[in-house]
Image: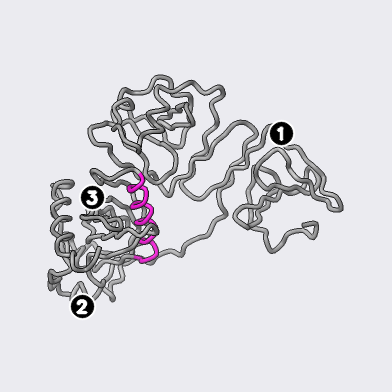
Amino acid sequence: MRRARQSTAFVLCVSAWSVLHPSITPVVLGAQTAAPRTPTTNGTARDVDGGWPRDYTTPGGASLRVFQPQVASWDGKQRMVAYAAVSYATTGAVKPALGTVKFEADTAVAVDERLVNFSSIKLTQSNFPGLSKDQLQDIVAAIEQVLPKAGSPIALDRVLARLDKSQIVPKNVVGVKSDPPVIFYSTAPAILVNLDNDPVWSPIKGNDLRFAVNTNWDLFEHGPTRTFYLRHGGSWLSATDVKGPWTAAGKLPASFSQLPADDNWKDVKAALPGRPPATPPRVFVSTSPAELILLQGPPKYVAVAGTRLSWVSNTESDVFRIGNAGPVYFLVSGRWFTAADFTGPWTFTTPDLPADF
């Protein structure tokens, strides 16, 4: 979206916000609207946080504009829940798509700088009426990608406008810890459902189903029964918790047959009413990057000539072992990890591989 159209986008986004969240009054800063002269220690709120809205470009070339977040709650002045109006325009689009996102984040107050800094940002809900499934996935992925990198601090005085100043307690941000990736293991049929953080649910117009936009799987939540449904090929699994346990779904709610007749739901509607899976797979669900070592039965070892190594032949993963009972080595994304057994715990070992490799 070019600068010349920012004023129009501002008006449209305020209208969208009012429709989608009538209980929250937006305080949006348009590109051609002067920032409020909120007093601060060192200058205006715009001087402190750089001003809002903020523009980004998605990996697919779309324009993304995020307007000033509106705080819904700030428990203990540490954990914030907020909404933000968003406009999204693909290349060559006549007008942007408008909607809102809800996010949660840990916060730390930098009193001297008059800033509220965010960390551990998680999108928990999105609402973009009329946007296709692919566009929703693009916009959610884009927001999750740019917000943690940019930090997106907001002026403390913007937040204080609606909060009791006496409750502000400075808090240091704890350093980020790098953990090994989650590695699942199974010798029976299994699948891995990866989500980018906690599920981000999007409503479907005229339907009581919601779908998760931050996964490549067809994952749904049926509101009236609080049941989750997962499509696996032409079969369906269900669970009362998104992390399982998952079992064969049986009869699906009528809501599935009422999905819109467009390409977004083509594969889903083709899998209705669904056939019972011959052997329901075990479902591993992870909200952080994860891998699945899937073996077809117990491990089958093939000795690597001239080394102590054995190659595990009945898996599509790159897995080796010292002999048939020594440490296991797993190659993924160009990095090696090792564990005493397939079940872990795993550690990074690229610099320390045995000479056999």
In this rendering, does residue 143 appear at all? yes
In the picture of the structure, the residue carrying the numbered disc 1 is: 298
In the picture of the structure, the residue carrying the numbered disc 2 is: 41
Task: Say if 43 sits above or below 332 in the image.
Answer: below
Q: Residue furthest front?
A: 92
Q: Per the image, is 276 magenta?
A: no
Q: Per the image, is 147 magenta?
A: yes
Q: Nearer the viewer, residue 311 or 82?
A: 311
> Element type at marker 2?
loop
> Element type at marker 1?
loop
At x 35% / y 37%, what residue is drawn? 263
Tell me if 333 is positioned left or right of 78 in this view: right
At x 67% / y 60%, what residue is drawn? 350
In this rendering, does residue 86 appear at all? no
The quadrant holding residue 337 is: bottom right
Report the amino acid beneath label 3: Gly
Report how far apart the C-alphas of labels 3 and 2 lie in the structure.
Answer: 34 Å
Q: Position of residue 252 (x, y in %)?
A: 37, 23
Report how far apart the C-alphas of labels 1 and 3 lie in the structure.
Answer: 50 Å
In the image, the segment drawn in magenta is 134-151
What is the magenta segment's predominant secondary structure? helix
Tell me if 135 is positioned left or right of 231 in this view: left
> Element type at marker 3?
strand
Q: Residue furthest right?
A: 306
Task: Say if 285 sits above or below 278 in the image.
Answer: below
Tell me if 222 is positioned left or right of 95 in this view: right
Q: Earlier in the sequence, mark 1 or mark 2?
A: 2
Q: Are marks 1 and 2 in contact (CB under 8 Å)?
A: no
Quarter of the picture containing the C terminus is bottom right
As drawn, the label of residue 99 is: 3
